[in-house]
Amino acid sequence: MFLDRIVASVDARVEALRDEWARLEEKAQNMPPTRSLADALRADPGTLQVIAECKQRSPSKGWLTDHYDPVAQAQGYQRAGAAAISVLTEPEFFAGDLAHLRAVREAVSIPVLRKDFIRHPVQIAEARAAGADAVLLIIRILEPDQYRALYDYATRLGLDVLVEIHSPVEAEVALTAHPAIIGVNNRDLDSFETRLSFSQEMALALGPDIIKVSESGIHQVEDLRQVRDWGYQAVLVGEALMRGRPLLEEWRANG
């Protein structure tokens, strides 16, 4: 499966980084306070918030832009009303780089999420040391005990965590750590097929106290209206924005 190739690449990166863990953790512990992703998504109850994503490439869609300037992209998102920024840092399949996150974090005043395939605490320390305010944990690529250990480590370093799921079973695992934020990925990471209605199916399973984020398959204002009506507080949007659709502006004008 394609996801297995991504995980193998991530594990190789982790091996190369293990010796840096102590140094990165020390730096992480001395970083300034984070900006709360949870607070940003709760800031205006009843209003659907947007986590706008900076990414140059997608394994399923190819190159999304000919000229990638993550700082300019993120600043444009903030001006258009995004609540937070997601930055892809996975290098092999998404053409990401941790330097993109560092630069974006310095250029905006809203929370910045490290979007990557995190499998080891050293990646979390690395994220905090680079200025991330939050990290993504994908249940699909973690064992339950591994997930809870990573969640606890991230929160000890002051990071918010967006926990990503794509099935009812994964939702049950996610809830064992009592997360504040859960993202429902409408894209199956094995087949890369996307179905927006999956968010509707998962909404009731997560309960009213979770900040619910719908991810993937969101391209137009009507999609945003639907997920809001399903009880979601936020969406994570990348492809449509990276291809130049003014979705944030359209939502602000017509939402």
Image: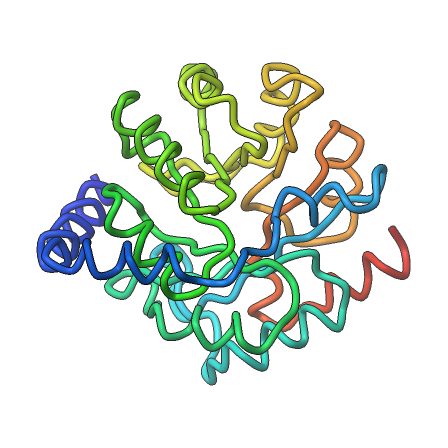
Left or right, 30 with reference to 93: right
Colour scheme shown: rainbow
The residue most toward the right is 253
Left or right, 36 with reference to 7: right
Left or right, 143 with reference to 109: left
Residue closest to the eye, 165 or 62: 165
From the top left corner, tell me how far across and down residue 139 is, in percent: 36, 30
The residue most toward the bottom is 67
Residue closest to the eye, 25 or 87: 25
Residue closest to the eye, 94 or 130: 130
Residue at x-position 72% and y-position 53%: 220
Residue at x-position 47% and y-position 46%: 158
**Residue 42, quarter of picture:** top right
From the top left corner, tell me how far across and down residue 117 is, in percent: 31, 47
Residue closest to the eye, 243 or 229: 229
Q: Relative to 186, say whether 112 is above or below.
A: below
From the top left corner, tell me how far across and down residue 140 is, in percent: 33, 31
Q: Relative to 30, say whether 159 is above or below.
A: above
Left or right, 21 with reference to 73: left
Q: Relative to 119, say whether 16 is above or below.
A: below
